[in-house]
Image (spheres, helix red, strand yellow):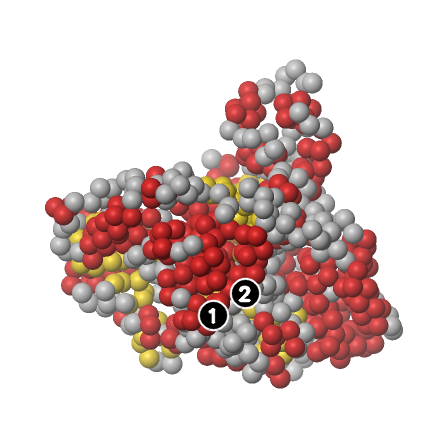
Amino acid sequence: MLLKTKYDLDNAREQYGKLVDKQARKVLVCAGTGCVAGGSLNIYQKLIETISAKGLECVVALADEPHDDDIHEGAIGVKRSGCHGFCEMGPLVRIEPEGWLYTKVKLDDVDEIVDKTICNGECVERLCYKKNGEIYRQQSEIPFYKMQQRIVLEHCGHIDATSIKEYLAIGGYRAFEKALLNMSPEDILNEMTESNLRGRGGGGFPLGRKWTSVAKQKSPTKYIVCNGDEGDPGAFMDRSIMEGDPHRLLEGMMIAGIATGAKEGYIYVRAEYPLAVSRLKGAIAQAEQFGLLGDNILGTDYSFRIHINRGAGAFVCGEGSALTASIEGKRGMPRVKPPRTVEHGLFNEPTVLNNVETLANVPVIINNGAKWFRSIGPENSPGTKAFALTGNISNTGLIEVPMGTSLRKVIFDIGGGMRGDGKFKAVQIGGPSGGCLVTPNLDIQLDFDSLKKVGAMIGSGGLVVMDDKSCMVEVARFFMNFTQNESCGKCVPCREGTKRMLEILERIVNGNGQEGDIELLLELADTISSTALCGLGKTAAFPVVSTIKNFREEYEAHIRDKKCPSGNCKKLVTYQIDPEICKGCSKCSRVCPVGAISGEIKKPFKIDTSKCIKCGACISNCHFKAVKEV
Amino acid sequence: MTKEFDYSPIDKILENHEKTAVIAILQDIQEIYHYLPKEIFPYLAKKLGTGEARIYSVATFYENFSLEPKGKYVIKCCDGTACHVRKSIPILEYLRGELGLSEKKTTTDDLMFTVETVSCLGACGLAPVLTVNDVVHPEMNPDKAAALLKELREKEAE
């Protein structure tokens, strides 16, 4: 369907809206990467087959040219939605209009869901979320969801992520229409500046200022680039938006185009996100087919096109100038700034470079106004922020809360606290560029400025929670290994400095640490941070500095006592059999691959530490938990 | 230029791309061969009107491009932060040990298996994960990896 005028667009929205409204029940199967890995697409197929076999009308896709007689009362809509966020409980299936959420759904559960819920409107309580003996039928009542405020992720899990029609049915592209037909570029720029929306990719630069700088440039060619190279390990909010609500991202980019006078946009998606690439490609093709991308959009003289670029596995391409170099088909290496990207960006033209979550905020600000946006969160960091909760936490998943929410609330109330019986030790925020926050920081507000004060940064929003069994020196080594691997090699401080820091950290975790290593690490960190060329290098040492600040005694234990207090560093651990507990069953000696365990049956066995390779086979095979790491 | 090498698939790929889109062209070529055969470099240089060194520089910069042939099953162990703290390394060590591979030698001699690490697949909710030819296997441990390997080997034996 080609939408040539505002009237066509309004009409399409109304017609598709009606089609969706007439569906007696909607079944939304989560089709995010997590649930797909858990088999959700097979569940989706089986739902369609089972519902159709019952003789019910099953609507998988809305009709192309909707007419009133297409609308049937009582049809069942089965949809592939974006990520619901509660990945720990996946695969997830949401039932509307009731608002029930079924968790950990298996293929075998489909018959019961169709029989009870679809045919008779009964809830399958067995599949509902349970905590402390209470059964939560309603998704909105589950503590994980109840304390969130979903603005950017509002559609994720609620509409079919693969359909522009569903996006139109809930009023999609209304902000674009408003920006194109009822606002001047200056109006848009003023509204965005007024909203004080700050970049969600890490830096927190005000979006209004960036757009205004590009709009002021005289060059006739300008570009909008969306940074979807979400490389921080443990962060997946941008992926969820690209997969779950791709049209919203396109809409944000199209509004940026109107505001700055750009006619072309590029989305750079990292190679590890194939699903996001295919959803975005599909969304672009649909928007072109509907005439929302292309020439003379909605009868105006405005033209806009969007291209997709797949990354090829280089973390440094998340840096602005490296990303544009990569789109140009070159090695993704950062360059010296200035000139800034807003002046000389992609193909040397003025370029708006925003991250996915930032652009996804744009349509809702245009729709609801800057004043509304500023009513959420603190004065200097308005709006919400999506966080990815991972690591040793109960409720792994994707959440969205107002900026300024306390870390305690995020980890213990929404995240459900620690996984298993571990105790909270630290949370790494901001990935390999960030720092760790510890117990005394739990009441800190999560926003740009509060985090900066304690030497951490919001980064892209990955929160990796660690319990008391995690070794912080090893965590620092892990991040340094990552950054060292990803260093592009252009500037010496990063290329050589991170290598030296990694060597020192490796010798510490291997029990060869020397006096003065901590001081040497801090000195190197200081030099790298002040002299490296780009953000990757400048922040590379942050995890080391922050773990030394908070856990210096752990470093000292490794270096002086050759002990790892959390028992994590294999080289610093010895295995022993507790003679009080050992029953002398000989199981351990039989599973030991190097024959390091010996003894007499029914008498305590012994480990020869000179032979032991610390593989852990004895620990996992001992029924009496007699083998200990000391 | 090597005579035996069939360049027709490459010509087809070139038709779909602008000359500057070196990365996209290399990605498409790798999709066919699972690596970048050395024969393509002089050919691309000629066709794209650029230096061989420039194309080679792009191919060696990005992690995803391989100049060595890869196994039929490419197993990628995620060692992102979330997977790392949920013990991804023992899985990697198991796979390497079982297949006789190491950090340097990543592909078995019979070109059946390649084992690599990847720095975050974004499926952190299911950590630790690994992928076999891009299909995600959630919540792994060494025992599950052993079962998976057995399954793949049996499939091959059939």
Q: Left or right: where does residue A550 sit relative to residue A385?
A: right
Residue B11, how many percent across, how many down? Answer: 55, 22
Residue placed most toward the observer, A494 or A556: A494
Q: Which residue is mark 1?
A: A383
> Which residue lies at the image location 44% right of the left edge and 53% below the top edge?
A255
- Residue in the picture at 50% in, 56% down: A356
Q: Which residue is mark 2?
A: A198
Who is closer to the viewer here, A283 or A1?
A1
Q: Is residue A42 left or right of residue A563?
A: left
The number of callouts visible is 2
In the depicted structure, whether residue A354 falls above or below residue A391: above
Q: Secondary structure at mark 1?
A: loop
Up-down relation of residue A196 to residue A295 (above or below) = below
Residue A319 in sight:
yes
Could you tell me which secondary element the residue under label 2 belongs to? Answer: loop
Q: Amino acid at mark 2?
A: Arg
Task: Give the image location of residue A273, x and y in percent.
Answer: 51, 49
Q: Amino acid at mark 1?
A: Gly
Near mark 2 (Cα within 10 A), the count class, few <14, some 14-19 or many ≥20, is many
Q: How many angstroms separate mark 1 from mark 2 (CA)?
A: 9 Å
